[in-house]
Amino acid sequence: MNIIEKNLKERISQFEINWEMNPFPHAIIDNFLPPEIFTKIINGLNHIDSFQDVKKKFQSHVEFNKNVYGDSDLNELAKLPIDILGGSNVKEIFGKFLNGQKLISLCDWPDYGGYYPFHSMIPGGVLGAHVDHSHSRDGDLHVANSIFYVSPKWKESWGGETILFNHIGTKAMKKVVPAPNRLILFIHSSSSFHGVNTIFSPAGVKRSTYYMDYYIPEKELSHVYTALKNKGCKNLVYSFHGTSFVPFFPLGVKSFKIKFIFMKSTYPYLGVFLKYMIVRFLLNNQFGRNLRKIKYMFKKKRKLN
């Protein structure tokens, strides 16, 4: 792994990484890994259908035809993207953009902090507009994401693009095709809505990805704010919330259907989204932190009892 990281560091130094600010800061790196390594990784994923370590399956209209996997079925090479995304090289890319800010990744915690970095979606799949959880279980602030696309091939006509939405998740602003060996990096906040467009790939062709989250101690948020403001990005918002989807407009306002109002699966998402809206627009971040402390106090008290 050290040799791979060293070689990758040299490879990254040759990339011209262009950050775009709208709708929120993001960068795309094509041909991220050397072709021979990428080929070995996708060969290690040839038998996804036989993987037993499925942690979650999603079948609602907001999250459809998506599986999230643990890493027990992944061989050493198939685990490599997780280590790379969570390792020093990708952290340094973000750190350079954020004026030297040091980041924590899921790989820095046992069991990835309770999350699962390998995902797969099948034809018909969709992932509605959402913002991810704002904090780790230990209270660190979620400030960045990466997504690495590992389907052996992908045609633009198959859809499945990563969509970057406007600050309230109602309008698609940019679509990123999940091209093989492509890496997308983006700054995460309470206003960085993203999702996955409907997949139209042929039967048996999966959209497979690795993802990684990055965090900072919340006391260092002012440094991140300053770095982003100096780059002309002034509209990012940070508050306290869980992963929150836009329940009636999964792919923007134009995707609304009357039937969504009457579907039972809508209402769990609606409850979470309303809490998100209250915290984001009516309460401040400090209030959310205080609520979190109270919540942990009650949990600790229950364990002691």
Image (cartoon, helix red, strand yellow):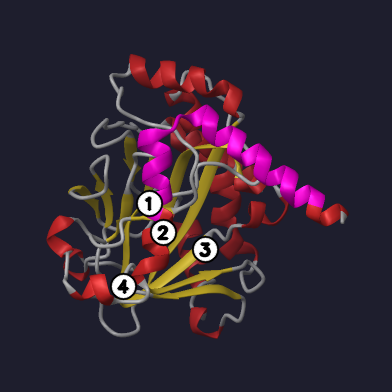
Task: Assign a secondary structure to mark 2.
Answer: helix
Q: CA distance from mark 4 to mark 3?
A: 21 Å
Contact, mark 4 vs mark 3 (Cβ under 8 Å): no
Q: Which residue is mark 4?
A: 61
Q: CA distance from mark 4 to mark 1?
A: 18 Å
Contact, mark 1 vs mark 2 (Cβ under 8 Å): yes
Q: Which residue is mark 3?
A: 118
Q: CA distance from mark 1 to mark 2?
A: 5 Å
Task: Assign a secondary structure to mark 1.
Answer: helix
Q: Amino acid at mark 2?
A: Gly
Q: Which residue is mark 1?
A: 274
Task: Assign a secondary structure to mark 4.
Answer: loop
Q: Residue at x 16, y 56 (%)?
A: 253
Give whichever of discs 4 and 3 has the lower sequence position.
4
- Nearer to us of marks 2 and 4 is 2
Q: Amino acid at mark 1?
A: Leu
Residue 211 among magenta residues: no
Q: Which residues are magenta?
A: 273-301
Give the percent coordinates (x, y) of residue 204: 35, 84
Give the percent coordinates (x, y) of residue 292: 62, 40
Contact, mark 4 vs mark 1 (Cβ under 8 Å): no
Task: Assign a secondary structure to mark 3.
Answer: strand
Q: Which residue is mark 2?
A: 271
Residue 300 among magenta residues: yes
Q: Residues within 10 Å of mark 4 (few under 14, many from 20)?
A: some
- Tally of marks: 4
Q: Amino acid at mark 4?
A: His
Q: CA distance from mark 2 to mark 3?
A: 27 Å
Q: Is residue 41 left or right of residue 303?
A: left
Give whichever of discs 4 and 1 has the lower sequence position.
4
